[in-house]
Amino acid sequence: MADDLAALLDYLKSPPANVLGQSDGGIEALLLGIRHPDKVDKIAAMGANLNPEGAYPETLALVRSMINGMSAAEKTSLQGRRELRVTTMLLEEPHIEPSSLEAIKAPTLILAGDHDLIRDEHTIEIYHHIPNSQLCIFPNATHFVSHDDPELFNATVERFFDTPFAKKDRVRDALKSLEKARAAHD
């Protein structure tokens, strides 16, 4: 699908694009950044995972339950076959090596809810493997924060896309902030 997105951007003669993806779309956004770095300007990936083990065990149990709960008629209908295929994907895909994320050069915002379906440590692993990344964990939010609180989600993504990217230095930039805070109190 990431290759299809690249082909679409070529067809549209699009300059590098800001790419936002959620869940499977977040995975596709990351793959686009890995395979077609010239097609992306910035990436925002919400609730992405690199492998099925990135999901909490209860998430995988829910998916299995949803699949087992589908009737034979549902599984054979056009909509049901599509739903079954998409739902089953989480149990079988993706298989992305964390080190492959190091190929992403575009500034990337990794997003998740603090009650996401994807394990917190997995989200942080993704963040740590992308050289020019930022991390946003939404408080009291699920995998569907974009639907539950669209104002917060959209404002966060828009700010990231609209603001020039500057990679922070953990120590140097903290010291600058400390100096500003001290100067404000003098």
Image: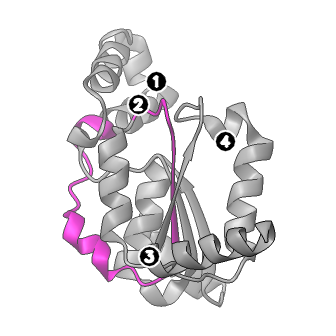
Tell me, yes or no, whether the two marked residues, 1 and 2, touch with CB atoms within 8 Å: yes
For residue 37, above or below residue 2 = below
Q: Amino acid at mark 4?
A: Ser
Which of pointers 4 and 2 lies earlier in the amino acid sequence?
Answer: 2
Q: Which residue is mark 2?
A: 81
User: What are the residue bounds of the magenta stretch?
Assistant: 89-117
Label 1, label 4: how far apart the Cα atoms are: 29 Å
Label 1, label 2: how far apart the Cα atoms are: 6 Å
Residue 11 seen in the figure: yes
Q: Residue at x 40, y 38 (%)?
A: 86
Label 3, label 4: how far apart the Cα atoms are: 32 Å
Pinpoint residue 181: horizontal percent, then vertical percent. 70, 68
Q: Which residue is mark 4?
A: 146
Tell me how the rendering is colored: one colour
Marks 3, 4: nearer the viewer: 3
Secondary structure under the numbered disc 2 in the rendered image? helix
Q: Amino acid at mark 1?
A: Ser
Q: Amino acid at mark 3?
A: Val
Q: Closer to the camera, 71 or 114?
A: 114
* Mark drawn on residue 77: 1
